[in-house]
Image (tube, grey):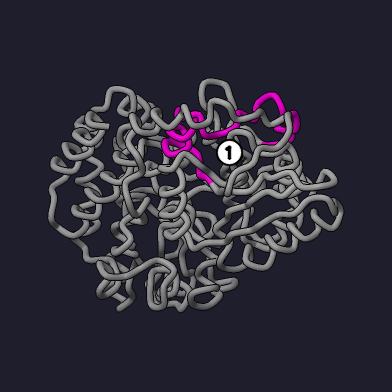
Amino acid sequence: MPNPEVPWPAPPPSRRSFLALSGLTALSVSLTAACGGDDSGGKPAAGGKVTFAWWNIATTEPGKSLFPQISSAFTAAHPDITIKTTSLENEAFKSKLTATTSSGKLPDVFQTWGGGVLQQQVDAGLVEDLTDAFGWSSDLTPVSLQAYQFEGRTYGVPYDVGMVGFWYNKKLFAKAGITAPPATWAELLEDVRKLKAAGITPIALAGKEKWPGHYYWAYLAMRVAGLPALQQAATTKDFTGAGFVQAGAHLKELVDLQPFQTAFLGAGYATPGGQAATMGNGKAAMELMGQWGPSVQKDAGADLGADLGFFPFPTVDGGVGQVTEVFGGGGGFALRKGAPKEALDFLKFFVLENQSKLLASNGYLPVVKGAESQLADPNRKVVADSLVKATGFQLFLDQAYPPAVGQEVNDSVADLIAGKKTPEQVTKSITEAAKGA
């Protein structure tokens, strides 16, 4: 599965320009009315036929095969509906969506991860409010819907949800004499030392793409300062508190151990020789990654099979955060303002009637209540159960915050990992970006 939180490659339009665009959609028809007509699809044709555009990021397995199968099954059952599908690699998708958003147009159905980016599109009046037409939202888990909800309204339909944690190679842990996954940050650092002493690369990291590194700082901030502190900082636009500085200091403790693979600063995530391939090929003992990690390991490298395990991000001694507070997100779809009602019918079919197929593909985690019982893979069960038991949830920071702030989190944490910024400088840079957003 493509990684769902790669940072936007180019800054999206400012909040002001988004709002200026809202006038372009003032006359768009509602979801429950007749479908609109623009170059992105949603055009009524003779005889009541409907065509709508669907943009997704399913360029790797299992979505590459599964998404077209689901689309074909829907159109076979609804011969008057045509779906024009565009599948783009993650970076290319976000670049193209940024450009089309700038023009005031969005495809009828488009991939979204919610959070700050979707919020800006909503503020501009470009996205359909699904709340009143989305009666089946009660069939979905609250945590899966959270990223797409603003002020009690729902603007997206999730098809996958999960959390970030450590995927680890049990064989390499055993070789280093590690008998159980670390439960605390101090234990993690000690395990890194044991792995290095055994001649094993402890951690694979895609330093070039930056977003994987932000996971460490975000989780450490949650564990040290607590989830409410992150939420408060988003409101006050001040990330200079002691807990955030301490998060950077703990990350520097890890970096100083030189735990990452050779040339990690130039490594991509899903590219040949990148983070996922390094992990999948058994050349590193751990990677901090989301629920899609095993699928990309297999796609880019090899399948570790029974040697692959999962453990949640450790707690930090003296920190107020709990291990049951999770950090992550998933994938969903939103509809442009005025998209045909058949587009939401398609999403209902995609999510509710194909939940079993999505889960059986081993690339996605359940969003339908109770569907976690269908999971057979023990690692995916651990992730799903952790989400069900979660006492708190934080969306990826590069999605939760406005794009400019999320990008600064990625950039500044990458600079800390590269030795170019201190923990204090990281918090000051993020605060400056937040105050300017």
Name which residue lies at 25% across and 56% down.
254
- Quadrant of the frame with the N terminus: bottom right
Image spot of residue 232 (x, y percent): 33, 24
Q: Amino acid at mark 1?
A: Arg
Q: Residues within 10 Å of mark 1 (few under 14, many from 20)?
A: many
Task: Tell whether position 54 is magenta.
Answer: no
User: Picture coordinates of residue 383 (x, y %)?
Assistant: 57, 50
* Direction from residue 243 to residue 350 in the image, left or right: right
Vertical placement of residue 346 versus 1, above or below:
above
Asked whether residue 320 is in view, the answer is no
Above or below, 245 against 91 in this view is above
Does the magenta run of residues contain 121?
yes
Where is residue 414 shown, x and y percent of the image? 24, 55
Q: Nearer the viewer, residue 367 or 334?
A: 334
Left or right, 376 with reference to 317: right
The residue wearing badge 1 is 336
Q: Which residues are magenta?
A: 112-140
Question: Closer to the camera, 319 or 133?
Answer: 133
57 up-or-down from 39: above or below = below
Q: Is residue 51 visible?
A: yes
Q: Quadrant of the C terminus?
A: top left
> Which x, y percent locates residue 34?
73, 33
What residue is at 80 percent from the left and 54 percent from the top?
74
Residue 29 sits in quarter: top right
SS under mark 1: loop
Q: Quadrant of residue 33?
A: top right
Q: Residue at x 84, y 58 (%)?
A: 76
To which quarter of the image does residue 153 belong? top right
